[in-house]
Amino acid sequence: MTKRKYGLIALVIGCFATISFVNQQKVQATGTVIKNKSRIDTEYPLSGASNFMMVAGNQFVQSESPFSGRIMANSVILKKQWIGPSGFNGSTESSTNTAYDNYFKNLKNPAVIINDFTKGNEKIYDKTEGMKNLVFHLGGMWQNPLVEDGLSKNTEFATDTSKADAEAAYPGMSVSLSGFSKGQQGTFEGLWKNKMVEGINGNLAKLPQYVDNGVNKYETSGGSTATDYSLQQNIQDVSQFYANLLPENAGFWSSTDEIMDLKQTNPINNENKVSRPVSNPFYITDPWPEVTDVIINIVAKADDPTVSAETREKTKPYTTEVDGKKPIVAVSIDRDRLTENYKKAKHMNIQFHFSDSFYKDDGKTLDSEKIPYIVINYKNFNDKRFDFQPGDGFYIGSVDNFKYPLNETDVGEPGYVNSIAKEVGGASDEDWSNPNVLKFGSHLLNNFTDTYDADNYPESFNQDKQDNSGLTAQTAAVSYTSRSPGTMLFGTMLIPHGSYYAGSSTHGLYIGGVVAANNITLDNAIISPEHDKSVFGNNQEFPDLNDGGMQKKSLSIPSI
């Protein structure tokens, strides 16, 4: 890829600009915990929701496509008994198929957390049939012919529901597990015996992850006392914590002064031909006028284009890690700046310009080991939603190669963007298993600070309201309904006030995790068994950012 004259390379992220943003505190339900208690450090970069691929503060709903990875939810609704290989954490693979053995052998327990095991939703799926599917798939997680009855203790679940309560809610529940456990019947008795994490016994408050983060309740609904701290509130606190990394009215912040805040502008690329003030990010209009490009400069001070080459040579080289931890930057994307350029803009491409220090010695390959952690905070999107679809995507580009690709053949052509996967060394635009591609995903957090489900705005913690909100592509706070040419969706989605929906047309091309305070719906959306490696901050390189739930003062001053 051709570099720009300043040695800056652009990573283009596209996001459909239809988001809801209002002041968080104005819509807090009465009785919720307002004080930020989130713990953000190396072990828990997302506090109580850390190190899980999917975390739903309410319902996790899955239809046909397979899912492998760690999930946490208040309740789980599985709409199909038979889903494609490898099923639900290996539940429908033949016990003689060992292709996923290493993956499931190393999957950390509990692989599945279900707070309210017996809860269903008749408006989504028949409760009894849903429970049969749940027992079937949990009972068959990672079959291994080398253990008795083909059942493995390596992939287990935990719940806050006792076996007695489950049996009382669904008396006589029995499902045939024939085909992967030697004809054994799936019952609550067998499930609790064979697949329950030891020592929990219907009390999730004992989980180390909950204890370490002060979580003693799953949902905010039902009111809270001074000593209650729900996982839903914890998710909201995490989002607010990352939003607060940015000083008031700032667009860019870095935890290290080795990454500078380079402010720029494009003086003529707007409909009024009026010069706009320098800023970081800065905003221009794409050749497709419905797209606004948002350019974020991530530039090492050693690559500062505003000083002489002699001065740069005397500057300390960029330090990739300090004591084994990487730096972190935060940026703010302001919707008000998007439409001042072109009033009819419907999409936005967010372009991260990385300087030479973040590339390998060949100058062509973005080094996934060198890039910092990146947090994108979105604000001022009123009462809209966020919908990733054609027109939105994640790319690599430069000031000379930033055009949005209308066709897949455009990707990588002169003037057009390139793919992230190829830029970090992947074999193709859709190489979703390459370690460098997965690492890139693990360094990016998309924080939808005040985006709401369209059918739950202003936000209500009424249980029935939450249960039936954000379940479709048209109502979820964040949805991924289709994709742009030659790209995948990158980064963990943090949705503190709504739901996430993914549909089949995405082809599962998503590199990251999801943390949603309400529902997660996977509507025939494939998830790769490798994607847990791309969950934000999961590789022990994440810095310790706080002390007792507040940002460390040493990190509160923006870099110059």
Image: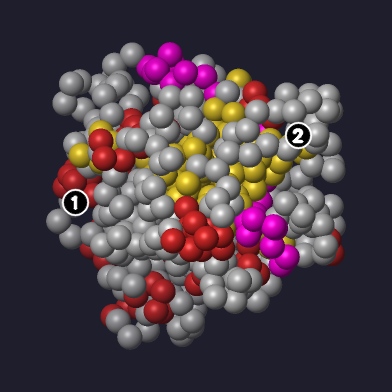
Residue 484, how many percent across, how many down? Answer: 74, 52
Above or below for 131 versus 362: above
Q: Which residue carries the number 1 mark?
A: 208
Task: Please count the marks in the image.
Answer: 2
Above or below for 23 versus 210: above
Give amino acid for label 2: Pro
**In which image quadrant can residue 293 be found?**
top right
Residue 356 visible in image: yes
Give amino acid for label 1: Pro
- Position of residue 458 in the picture relative to residue 290 (left or right): left
- Position of residue 401 in the picture relative to residue 126 (left or right): right
Mark 1, Cα crowd under 10 Å, few <14 / some 14-19 / many 20+, is few
Q: Residue at x 41, y 41 (%)?
A: 559
Q: Nearer the viewer, residue 133 or 11?
A: 11
Q: Earlier in the sequence, mark 1 or mark 2?
A: 1
Q: Is residue 156 magenta?
A: no
Q: Quadrant of the N terminus?
A: bottom right
Q: Residue at x 35, y 62 (%)?
A: 321
- Image: magenta residue range: 1-29
Closer to us: mark 1 or mark 2? 2
Dot 1: element: helix
Q: Which mark is residue 59?
A: none
Q: Residue at x 41, y 79 (%)?
A: 101
Residue 385, how many percent across, how many down? Answer: 62, 30
Q: Is residue 19 magenta?
A: yes
Q: Which residue carries the number 2 mark?
A: 267
Q: Residue at x 70, y 28 (%)?
A: 276
Q: Nearer the viewer, residue 298 or 349?
A: 298
Dot 2: element: loop
Mark 2, Cα crowd under 10 Å, few <14 / some 14-19 / many 20+, is few
Residue 452 visible in image: no
